[in-house]
Image: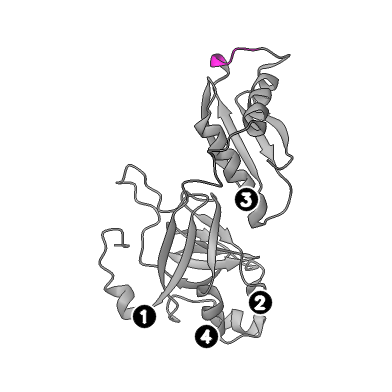
């Protein structure tokens, strides 16, 4: 396991940090740590929440048998024992899923494509080709329930957020900012550059697991036409 630092977030949470960069190698360390802790959970463990290069570990302090100076130090010692132990059966990040996400990049949906084309000095077709030709890792979800932060974009597509965020972005909007891409699960304000829209629901509160994507998943975008978007039939399509 890569060297990490562990700090206390609150009386019921610790943060394991593996560095300050956004890259696939550090995120893989995060997901391996997540799997280790969840498969070898200690008394009082509640859940883990992964981010780009860190992992929050939540626990119930009332269930921790304090053996160090503080409960936080007791939990930290348990975590280090888990991470540094010999666990040959634990491999990589474990339960990631590969998802094909259909996207219509039609002008009606890719409302920032013209502006991006000028800023990046690429044709709209080149932007679409570059965006849809990669497989992306879901680093984390946040901002709004189910919003996936995914990367890493081709360096030719790296761009700033919009200087004037929109008050409303449609559910299913596919966007880019920095070296990442994301999908808006619900209608919400947003400042990313919108290049298309998917007919899939990323958030469905009628399901036991309402989120289509989770940290560690892999995503590949598939180009579809406007007709295909409007006639998309699966039950998880947008209404």
First reached walking from the N terminus: tag 4 or tag 2: 4
The residue at 36%/62% (across/down) is 200
What residue does disc 3 label? 27
The residue closer to the viewer here, 122 or 67, is 67
Indicate whether residue 126 is drawn in magenta: no
Up the image or down, 173 lies above or below 42; here it is below
Q: Quadrant of residue 192?
A: bottom right
Mark 2, residue position: 156
Category of crowding for the residue at label 3, using alpha-carbon neighbours closer than 10 angstroms: few (below 14), some (14–19), many (at least 20): many
Q: In the drawing, what numbered circle is on residue 150?
A: none
Direction from residue 236 to residue 156 in the image, left or right: right
Task: Say which mark, if any, is on residue 225.
Answer: 1
| Any part of residue 170 in sight | no
> What secondary structure do most residues of the magenta stretch adopt?
loop
Describe residue 120's horizontal placement relative to residue 132 as left or right: right
Mark 2 or 3: in front is: 3
Residue 168, x across and y down, in percent:
48, 62
Magenta residues, start to end: 62-66
């Amino acid at each position: 396991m890569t060297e990490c630092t562990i700090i206390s977030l609150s009386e019921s949470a610790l943060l394991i940090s593996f560095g300050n960069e956004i890259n696939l190698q550090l995120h893989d360390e995060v997901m391996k740590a997540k799997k280790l802790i969840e498969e070898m959970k200690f008394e009082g463990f509640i859940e883990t929440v992964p981010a780009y290069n860190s992992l929050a570990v939540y626990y119930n302090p009332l269930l921790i048998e304090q053996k160090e100076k503080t409960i936080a130090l007791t939990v930290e010692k348990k975590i280090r024992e888990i991470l540094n132990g010999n666990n040959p059966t634990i491999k990589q990040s474990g339960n990631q899923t590969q998802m094909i996400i259909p996207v219509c990049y039609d002008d009606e949906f890719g409302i920032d494509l013209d502006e991006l084309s000028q800023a990046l000095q690429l044709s709209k077709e080149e932007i679409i080709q570059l965006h849809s030709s990669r497989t992306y890792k879901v680093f984390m979800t946040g901002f709004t329930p189910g919003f996936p932060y995914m990367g890493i974009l081709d360096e030719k597509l790296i761009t700033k957020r919009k200087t004037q965020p929109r008050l409303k972005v449609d559910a299913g909007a596919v966007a880019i900012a920095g070296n990442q891409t994301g999908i808006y699960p619900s209608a919400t304000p947003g400042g990313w550059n919108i290049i298309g829209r998917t007919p899939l629901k990323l958030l469905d509160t009628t399901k036991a697991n309402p989120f289509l994507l989770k940290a560690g998943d892999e995503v590949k975008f598939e180009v579809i036409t406007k007709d295909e978007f409007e006639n998309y039939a699966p039950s998880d399509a947008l209404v």
